[in-house]
Amino acid sequence: MSIDGVKALTFDVFGTVVNWRDSVAREAEAILAPLGVQEDWHAFADAWRARYQPAMQKVRDGTMPWNKLDDLHRMNLEDLLAEKGIGGLDEATLDHLNKAWHRLDPWPDTIEGLTRLRRKYVLATLSNGNVALMVNMAKRAGLPWDAILGAEVARAYKPQPEAYLRAADFLGLKPEECMMTAAHNNDLVAASKVGFRTAFVLRPVEYGPNQAKDTRAEHDFDVIADDFVDLAQKLGC
């Protein structure tokens, strides 16, 4: 099937659609600095994010039972705070800080690009984020999704094949009728292995000004775009 047969675009969200690093740094500073905590807030965000894949891997390999991402984020946050010697936070503060991931800002091109793409395609999240996280983020940022899918719905964390295949099934589509859209080479490679078409969108500062990975498309993906507006243009939207 050619790219003309694509009916839905499924999206990685953290880093591809929203700017997690600057957003988490902002939220952490707003919550913790008034309590007297002094940190390099971008380093704090990076350290929290660095625990993301190892925590999910424990679920993937069966070391840990299923936990939604909010719960994994909370475990990781508590470990990070303990490592940094930050204590004395009450439950309301911890919960609000953990939900910083619900309040991530979109990249400047995101809303315009998604709005254009939605004229032609079904748009669905295919994120490791849980449903409440994705819904709250979308509501706050105005993200125009048609469906919230991903790890919690599929009960599988990317890059497990089930995460992609179940998303296509929920949409009533064949894998080749879906195009995985992401700023991460490994996500697209995993999706392509189960039949998805692929679109790489460059996010050169997702990890900060000295980003060393995903600085280019490393494989022959179906579409390679500079941002979502460029992707919309290339897909005729």
Image (spheres, grey):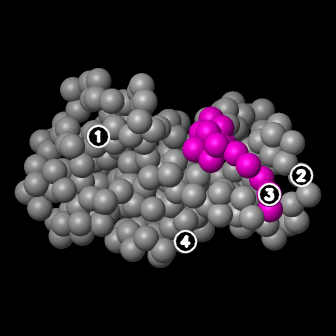
- Report the front residue among 189 and 50: 50
What amino acid type should be assigned to the residue bearing mark 1? Leu
Give the total number of marks visible in the rendering. Answer: 4
Residue beneath disc 3:
36
Left or right: where does residue 192 sit relative to residue 48?
A: left
For the residues labelled 1 and 2, say whether their Cβ atoms are less than 8 Å apart: no
- The residue shown at (74%, 59%) is 32
Residue type highlighted by circle 4 = Asn
Q: Residue at x 43, y 30 (%)?
A: 210
Quadrant containing the N terminus in the rendered view: top left
Mark 4 or 3, which is nearer the eye? 3
Nearest the eye: 123 or 48: 48
Label 1 and label 2: CA atoms lie apart by: 38 Å
* Alpha carbon distance from label 3 to label 1: 37 Å
Q: Is residue 192 visible?
A: yes
- In this view, the residue farthest toward the right is 88
Give amino acid for label 2: Gly
